Image (cartoon, rainbow, N blue to C red):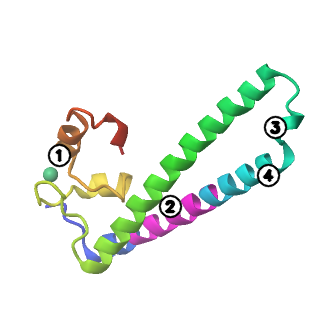
Amino acid sequence: MDVPTQAHLTTLRDLLLYRRRELTSDVHAAELTRQAAVSSSPATEVSTHAEGAAQFAQAEVDAAQEQRDRDELAQVDAALVRLDQGVYGDCADCGEAIALQRLMAQPAALRCAACQVAFEHRPGAAAHRA
Ligand SMILES: [Zn+2]
């Protein structure tokens, strides 16, 4: 069986903590960028409609990326809670152990591969793809 051992769990916790630091700094950087954009380019300084539209489009892209980072950060936090509770590595849907290989590639995984595929093919689930 490829169920995580204590040594694996320690490695996985390190992976999660590392990812958490990355995401936290990404989200923080996005916040700073947004604040800088707001203070440095008030609407009156936008010279053309095209320029304003381009800035708006970029802001939309940045906001989407920031939201993905925040979503992943929440997943990483939830995985760390499961580690502390000793329930880490159990599939949220079927309760079976998630394959170690999958956890190493995706430490915040909430489901086994089969359940994740089923989840993503549910109608309307595409927006919540991990
Ligand atoms: Zn499952």
Seen from this angle, which residue lies furthest front? 44
Find residue 36 and name its label: 4
**Up/down of 14 relative to 95, above or below:** below
Magenta span: predominant SS is helix
Question: Within 8 Å of ligand 1, the CB of disc 1?
Answer: yes
Element at badge 1?
Answer: helix
> In which quadrant will I find the N terminus?
bottom left
Which residue is at a point 23% across and 64% down the rendered structure image?
Answer: 89
Mark sitting earlier along the chain (4/1): 4
Query: What's under tag 4, amino acid-wise?
Result: Ala
Q: Label 1, on which residue?
A: 115
Of badges 4 and 2, the one in the foreground is 4
Query: What's under tag 1, amino acid-wise?
Result: Cys
Left or right? Give the position of 87 relative to 78: left
**Up/down of 91 relative to 116, above or below:** below
Q: Label 3, on which residue?
A: 43
Which residue is at a point 38% across and 59% down the rendered structure image?
Answer: 75
Which residue is at a point 29% across and 53% down the rendered structure image?
Answer: 101
Give the CA distance from mark 3 to mark 1: 47 Å
Mark sitting earlier along the chain (4/3): 4
Give the CA distance from mark 4 to mark 2: 26 Å
Give the CA distance from mark 4 to mark 1: 42 Å
Q: Determine the image quadrant of residue 99.
A: bottom left
Q: Label 2, on which residue?
A: 19
- Asked if the stretch drawn in magenta spans residue 12, the answer is no
> In which quadrant will I find the C terminus?
top left
